[in-house]
Structures are given as C-alpha cells and as structure tokens.
Image (cartoon, helix red, strand yellow):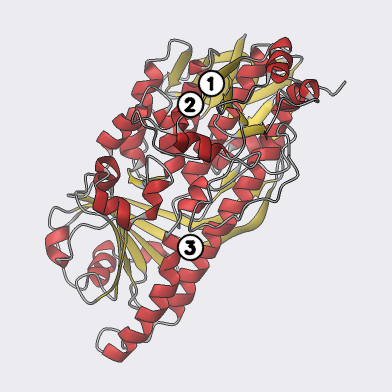
Amino acid sequence: MTPVLIVGGGPVGLCLGIALARAGVRAVLVEEREGPAPHPKATLLGARSMEHFRAWDRLDLKVADAAMRQEEDYFILFCDRLAGHELHRFRSPGLEAVRRRAPEAVARFRELAWSPWGKTQIGQQALEPVLLAEARRQPLLELRHGWKQIDFAQVEGGVVSHIEHAGTGQRESLAARWMVACDGGASAVRRRLGIRMGGRGRMRSNVSYLFRSPDFLGAHGKGLANLYFCLAPDAFGVFTAIDGHSTWNYQHYWADPARDAAQDDPATVLHRAMGKAFAFDLLATTHWHHHQSVAHRWRDGRVFLAGDAAHLFVPTGGVGMNTGIGDAVDLAWKLAAVEQGWGGAALLDSYEAERKPVAWRNSVISANNSDRIDMVMGEVAPDIDVSAASRDALRKRILWMAKQFNSAGTHLGYRYADSPVVVPDGTAEPPDDQGQVVPSTWPGSRFPHGWLADGSSTLDLVDRSAFTLLAAPGAAAPGLLAAIRAQGVPLVLRDVADPVAVELMQRPLVLLRPDGHVAWRGADDPAEAEAIATRIRGGEPA
C-alpha cells in the first residue's frame, strides 16, 4: 500500500510530491497530461513560494533561471490602448534587482527587506518542467503521467483508486493510506465527495488569447512590462508577458454574461486593445470565469483537497497558485509526521483549520482587487482616446487602484491564528496589511527573514525535516527539549548569536515547525513543557 496518492500533477501536486519525498514518505502521483499545461493560467510566484523552493536544495535558483528575464524593474502599465497614451506605470523590484540586491534597489524598495525573494514572473509552462525535473530526482516519488483517476473508494485504513491510461485504456487499482486531490477547480474528487464551495462563486466572464508575436514590443514602444492594462471602454483587458520576447497573453474582460465571446474575432480584439494592427500567431483561446470560492470541507476521511480543488481565485494579485503551494507544504509535513509515527490525530485535522482561513483571506483580497479594477473601468469616459481631461481624471483613479499591487503582505503576512497545533502566548495579533509585512514571531506567523553575517538568511535556520528551537544567548529550555523528544518529535536546537536573528526572534526562545512557522515562543523554559509538546504534534491532551 502506497502511503500517499496524489491526484493531479500541476504545480500543487508536484510540490506536494516533492515535499513528501524529501520528508521520507513514498507517494504516487497520477496525472492525465503528459506535458506541461499548454495555457499558462498562473504566471506569478510570490516570495513565500520561492522561500519554500529555497529550502529544497536551492530549487529557487533553478526556478529563477527559468523565469522571464527582465533586467529592469517589475512594471505594471496602465494605458487607454497599449500603443496609445500611458496613464501610469507601477514599479516594484524585478527579478534581477532582487537577485543582485544593489544598494540603490534596497534603498528604494522596502519589500527587499522582508524576503530573499520578491515577485517572480514565470508561467506554468516554464515552472512545471522545473518542478517535474525536481520530482524525477526523488526516488520516493512515482510519477504516473498519462493516467487518470476514473473512480475511488475509501476502505478500512485507506483509499482504493481506479486509474486508466489515457492512451491505451489499460486499467489498474492503487491502494494508498491517504489521497490528496490536486485535480483543479473542476475537481472530480471534490464532486465525488459531495463537498460544496462557499464564497461569491462565479464572477466576471473572460476570454484569454495566448499568442506569439516577436513584433509585440515594437508595436507599442513602451518597453517590457509584466502586465499591460488597457482601459479604453471597448478594450478592457490586460496583456501578460509570458516569456518577455515572443509569447504573450491577452485577458479580455467583458461584463455581459449573455454575450457569446466565441463570436469575437481574435485579431479584432487584439488590434483594438493595442490601438493598431500588429502581426501575431494565435496559439490558444480559453473561455473562463473569475471565481471566489472556497470548499466547505478540506478533508473527508482519508482524502484531502489542495490547491484549486479546495479554492478558486480571481487572478488579480497572483495569489491562487501560491496559496496552493502553501497548502502542499503544510499538508506534506503533517502527513509525514503521521506516517513516521510521531504526529497525532489532530495534526491532520489542523490542515483545514490552518489553510482554509488563509484561502478565505487570500481569495477575498483577490476578489476585492478585481472589484477595484472593475470600478475604475466602469468610470472610464468614452472619449478617453482624445480627451486629456478624461485621461487626467482616470489617472487619479488608477493611482488609488494600483496600491493593490503592493502585495508583499498578502504573500508573506498570513499566519495560523487559532491553530490547534500552535501555542498562543496571549499577545495581540500583529496587523495584517496586504501592502506591507510586519515581521513578527507571534505564534502561527512565518519566521521573519533577515540577512545574517555569513550571507545566509534567518529562514535558513529552519530545519525542514524537524522542529527547530532557536535559543538566544543565555537562553535555554532543557525541559521543553526533553518533553518534545520524549514524544518522538524530531527536534534540532540552534544557538543563535547573530544580532539580526536575535532581534527578529523577539523572544529568547522560539520554536519553529518544519514549515518555518512559529509553534511557540517564550522567555524561559516553560513549566507546561509536556502539554506544549503534545499540542504541537497534534496529540491528545493528558
């Protein structure tokens, strides 16, 4: 019997498989597609996802090498038409600025102080091969591409999955102790379990045109940007850079659900948004909807939901795939703990308790961002192409709306408040601001980043296969160490002397989980050490 069966091999499924294998747990991944997703629906990795990759033998560097090359900063442009009037240019640190850490960039962009990484523009078609190569390096992970799950049943002690090869029709049955559905927004597993979604549900209709055009940059003359918003009333939408030189996507918005966008001529739509004709080859057309939906339940017996199977996002802000990667990291160490015998029954229950509130938070932020864009679009004057006064009025609204693209707090600032496997300390929760990060070791928070004297990050203090107890000079917790180890929990003690790390700790003692979140903090060896040890591993209180 396989310990874990993963249904779906997109970024979330691959990340889950990699994380499990690195934790020493065998898994089988079943994915119908043979190659990467042809249409790159997700195009942005946030800093937190890159931090997780950093912990996987510096996979972050391979991802960065595969990402869109951009020597200048990360730009979001707002125009009436792309070849027309530029109304505003939002700037944040680009990938090369993040990697070089030039003093002028550090001084200009405060987000460079909050993480070793920032926004990384990379489409699924470029990310998935990097993740797949890493997955193939894992001897404990079996990849079954070309296979799809056609049915499953929960049985005593596990799940039996019936799979079929897409090419030959050959059928097999797989038995696993746990199954994780990473099979997308239309998840057959979720539907089979009868799990409903909450939230606003289906929102705006869209059609996306993926196209190749080496002439694109020359046609508009505004240089390389990551996103180009077009706000002319007959051309609402956004161009996205896929590779930054020849492949692009145009997401065309429309508000009339009764209108059949299939009747639109792609050349007419693209040329209207550009404001002039340009040469292109259409690669794919995709009709879809914005969603803000979160599953009511993330677990049914031995089956879990993760990624789009558990939540659907508006793409504004690039948070959906990143939330799914966070799901994978959270669930992987907990499944590994249970498989290795030290994780208690409540540890797996804590997956939903921790990740569902994050999905609600992030999906609402994304939907609100979309609403702001819709509001600005709804106020655009019909003479925007010819009236400087109309453009000036629109520019003021854009400046207000563009603040949403300061999203470091969305990606880095979530925390597991009220988690059953985190020990609260009675202090007030820090501000949760999508535009900035408030570094904190408040229990449940991500341990903050800071650069140490040896050039490493404080994030590198985390042992991803064990709990880590950080102790500032003069601090010790022999009772807590003994209690945790007595319950079989793997634990590493790190004496911390670097003043940057000591300041970020905020307390002399900080206990970190394998995912880098704070499980407990204190000033002294706690009297209730056994209860703390029981809680953090999801055990039953004595």
* Separation (CA) of disc 1 from disc 3: 52 Å
Is label 2 or label 3 in front? 2
Percent x, y of residue 518: 61, 34
Q: Are marks 2 and 1 in contact (CB under 8 Å)?
A: yes
- SS at badge 3: strand
* Quadrant for the N terminus in the image: top right
Percent x, y of residue 459: 46, 32
Q: Is residue 195 left or right of 505 when viewed as pictured?
A: right
Q: Is residue 42 visible?
A: no
Callout 2, which amino acid?
Answer: Leu
Residue that numbered label 1 is attached to = 494
Of marks 2 and 3, which one's residue comes earlier in the chain? Answer: 3
Q: Is residue 297 above or below residue 248?
A: above
Is label 1 or label 3 in front? 1
Q: Which residue is drawn at the image coordinates 33% and 29% (left, top)?
A: 130
Residue that numbered label 2 is attached to = 461
Q: Which residue is drawn at the image coordinates 21% and 53% (left, top)?
A: 72
Where, by quadrant of the figure, is residue 458 drawn?
Answer: top left
Q: Is residue 185 left or right of 285 when viewed as pictured?
A: right
Local packing at callout 1 (Cα closer than 10 Å; few below 14, some 14-19, many 20+) is some
Local packing at callout 3 (Cα closer than 10 Å; few below 14, some 14-19, many 20+) is some
- SS at badge 1: strand
Residue that numbered label 3 is attached to = 205
Where, by quadrant of the figure, is residue 76 drawn?
Answer: bottom left
Callout 1, which amino acid?
Answer: Arg
